[in-house]
Amino acid sequence: MWVLHLKRGIWPIFKKNLMGETRGWFLELLSTIAVPLSFFLAFGLGLRGDIADVDGVPYMAFITPGLIALTIQLEAFRSGSWNLWLSIRHHKTIDEYRIKPISMADILVGDVMSGFTLAIIKGSLVAITLLLLSPFTLTLPKLLAFLAMMLPGAVMFTCLGAVMGVVFRRPDQIAQIQSIIITPLLYLGGLFFPISRFPQAIQNVLVWVPTTAIFEGGRQAFLAGHCPLQMLIGLWVLALIAFFATVAWCEHQLRH
Amino acid sequence: MTVAPEASTPVKPYGNKPNHDGIVVRDLSKCFKSGNHAVQALSHVSLEAYSGQVLGILGSNGAGKTTLLNILTTVTRPDAGEAWVGGYSVLTQAEQVRQRLGVVSQDDRFDTYLTLWENLSLHAELHGMPKRQFVPRIERLLKQVDLYERRNSYVELFSGGMRRKASLIRALIHEPAILFLDEPTTGLDPVARRQVWDAILSLRVGRTLVLTTHYMEEADQLCDTLVLMDKGQVLTSGTPTQLKQQVARQQKAALGGQALWQCRFSQPVAGQWLESLQAKAPAGSVIKTPKEDTLHVMMPLENSHWLWVWAASLPQNTLTAIEQPLPSLETVFFALVDKPIALNEDLVSGGLV
Ligand SMILES: Nc1ncnc2c1ncn2[C@@H]1O[C@H](COP(=O)(O)OP(=O)(O)OP(=O)(O)O)[C@@H](O)[C@H]1O
Ligand SMILES: [Mg+2]
């Protein structure tokens, strides 16, 4: 069991990944905010008159939590996959860390943790930007409830990314997975509209998809300040399983 | 904990723990398979290096040098055989081995999006060093290789040679007992190369150093023991002089009863000495002056006593040595790796063959 092999390597690896991100932070910040901000302006402001309130909530407020969640999950997948891919295939630093007196589990845990931490940080930056532009005010309990729903999603997407980073040899393969799997998962999960607008047959499928819980649950937490308990527990259980399984699987793959 | 976390399929420990804390390699084999194509990168490699020694591994491209180093540094797992580094098994005690390792890999592995300082301190932290210990040490090492001014630059902006130097000092931060250097001077300018040579010679005290190189001069100057590899096998090993003598013997046989002698003088060779030698030398002898104070004589072995007769007739203290010159290490390499044996490069360059 990899937990038994953990040593002091997690923190240095975690720190190094975050340090790498502070480089060119201004452009990084702009590129993180650009997509959700564009959606916000296009749908929230541009189509304001054309889209009615959704379930009694102004559309602008309705999509705000969705756009923050989108940023977090995309970022989690991005850093989860690229951190490992670069280290294994490009910089080859994985072999450099391997010969230090730490374990492979340290490296993987450090990588996954920095992945979802970064995602939450970037999500928060988007949240601040969008909240400055909308009349909506966020109270602390609402924020905490929202983060409680976001964090397990971020863990899952970082783990999914990490597995992709280990599996694929070419960078374009990761981009393909992002287009084929990640984007539909995110966009169909109730980001722009409640899934109750879908035909019943599709709804029956979507309720089983974790992203639905992330978006629906996140929105409820964000707007009303309480987490749907079932979704919350389900997401956390899934996230923990994903975390343990991912580290174990990657550790196995990267042995020698 | 003595079991390596990455120990996948347990390889049966081979023999007993060696009684010294240098490097012991016994019967290592490694085959790389991809699809239906297989490369036997190492087959039954055995060698030994003691603390205080510099072991040089020579061999053509693809000979298996890096693969061997990867196994000894616990990066790659062998298919068969066993190795001990610093007294610990690389198969079952990887953790202890890693604590004692310093490695300069062939491809400089850096997080290029971080600065040099960030890279170096990360590696010190991974070795569990406290900040007050590693900061002065990194500063001192950076100054030694003239990289101190560049410590806050991103590594991706570094030239090849600068990365090489950075790799070297990174391997030294935690003062390892065993150092592996995979082509440490490739891409360095002559000044930097000398610096690295000096560093290697000063580091050897109390440490075991293993280096690979394609520069024969470097191997000759730095290494106490050399291992010559080809196609994953050890061809021969020994001190540089032993290897040269081995090849000199083979060449002697190839020269068919002829022998080459080198006479060294304390002053330029005078014309009348040469004339007297030509007069005394047996028929068929070849005499050349490759340098103005050096003379090469090739003559049948059974007649070579003439040389001493002639030497006795010279003014005192002019002739300093009569010797059979050993081939250079480069000749050794050509002779042993590039079979069939190439006739003495040194003789050719001396103009005798
Ligand atoms: N990971 C790998 N997968 C497949 N083949 C490999 C791998 N690593 C090495 N080889 C093969 O093993 C052989 C030995 O390679 P190695 O890198 O050890 O040579 P080397 O002696 O270090 O050569 P060079 O002087 O060029 O550095 C080569 O044929 C190489 O193609
Ligand atoms: Mg090599």
Image: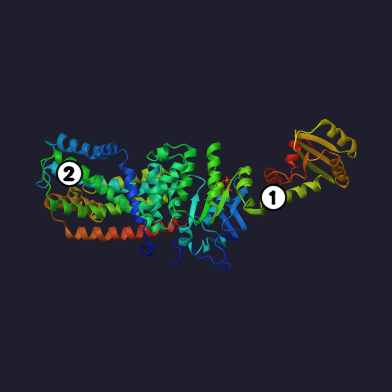
Residues at circles 2 and 1 in contact by the CB criterion of under 8 Å: no
Q: Amino acid at mark 2?
A: Thr
Instruction: Give the quarter of the image for residue B30.
Output: bottom right
Q: Is mark 2 within 8 Å of ligand 1?
A: no
Residue B10 in view in this figure: yes
Q: Nearer the viewer, residue B155 or A208?
A: B155
Same chain for labels 2 and 1? Say yes or no. Answer: no
| Image mark for residue A64 | 2
Numbered mark located on residue A123 in the image:
none
Callout 1 secondary element: helix
Q: Tell whether B147 sits left or right of B337.
A: left
Could you say which quadrant of the image residue A175 lies in? top left
Give the percent coordinates (x, y) of residue B321. 77, 43
Residue at far left of view: A56
Viewport quadrant of the N terminus of chain A:
bottom left
* Quadrant housing residue B3: bottom left
Nearer to us: label 2 or label 1: 1
Position of residue A131 relative to residue B46, above or below, is above
Q: Residues within 10 Å of mark 2 (few under 14, many from 20)?
A: many
Residue at the far bottom in the pictured view: B16
Which one is nearer the viewer's eye here, B57 or A57?
B57
Within-10-Å neighbours for mark 1: few <14, some 14–19, many 20+: some
| Residue type for callout 1 | Thr
Tell me if residue B186 can be seen: no
**Secondary structure beneath label 2:** helix
Name the residue carrying label 1. B241
Q: By what rule are the colours in the image chosen?
A: rainbow
Tell me which chain the residue with mark 2 is part of: A
Q: Is residue A92 above or below residue B314?
A: below
